[in-house]
Image (tube, rainbow, N blue to C red):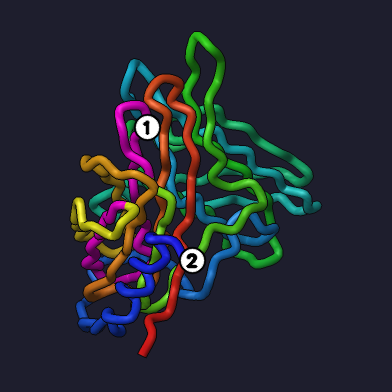
Amino acid sequence: MSTLQRSMKCLIAFWGLLFAFCLPAFTETPLPGREKREVGDLDSDSVIPVAANSPGRFGAHFKTRVVIFNPTDRDYVITARLYDRTGQARRREVIMDAFEYRVWDNFLEGVFDYRGSGGIWLTTSDPEDRFYVTAEVYTDSPNGRFSTTVVNGIYPNYSAGYDLNFNVGIKVNASRRTNIGVLNWGTEPSSIEARVRDGDGTLVQTIRFDLAPEAWQQKSINARVDNGFVVWEVNGGSDAHYFYAVEVDNESNDGTLNWSVQIEPVG
């Protein structure tokens, strides 16, 4: 058993189930249903947990390319909602004709006239108005385009409840950086701590996320980490989240997105 595995087993053994505080909902437009959203599935709604239209390090500018396909014989309207640190930041209508697909090379700019980052929810009013979505965050460089697939028929891991979540194999050094983020999929505020541990289990950084209902945040790991891991601990409020880590090469800005894995504590 590796040092990392022993460290995780020790952490899981001593951390019990987390206590859920009952906090009021502050949003006027709640997301309907708290069940798992199969992102990228052919459905009447879809989630893009992270999107960007913002500058990055080393001269990069990150954008989000989105393709939406209506494979039905129905005309309909998709409601697009953007969530940032404050909650719902924008709401726009996207008209889709029968058998039409539409492409945006910068979805946040083209649809929301928004510069920054956040999470997106797409939905129609009728369950029969189904569509398919692909999304990638990318940056162009002198050496070509570097992109990170966010939605492409791959289902991000949805976390329901208060059990611990883990992102493993984390590296932060002179050539590689890592950002971690969360989309609060609930109608209550959320209090979260992300504990960053090195490969030997040493705690190197604690990052706190205090999210409004239906809000999104992303933060950087500042500590050096060698094949470490992140433990997500939900301390109260919402019990519905998407957790992720994205590792980025400092020279090319090429990124790898990893969804968290939920493990039930022992005992």
Tell me the distance, in whole angstroms, between the alpha carbons under discs 2 and 1. Answer: 26 Å
Please report the bounds of the magenta region as a residue range: 171-198
Q: Nearer the viewer, residue 228 or 125?
A: 228
Q: Residue at point 41% right, 53% down? A: 244
Q: Residue at point 37% right, 77% down? A: 163
**What residue does disc 2 label?**
158
Q: Where residue 195 sits: x, y (%)?
A: 25, 59
Residue 220 in view of the camera = no
State the SS at label 2.
Answer: strand
Which part of the image, by quadrant, shows the C terminus?
A: bottom left
Q: Where residue 232 sits: x, y (%)?
A: 32, 64
Residue 174 in view of the camera = yes
Q: Is residue 191 magenta?
A: yes
Q: Nearer the viewer, residue 69 or 61?
A: 61
Q: Residue at point 22% right, 40% down? A: 222
State the SS at label 1.
Answer: strand
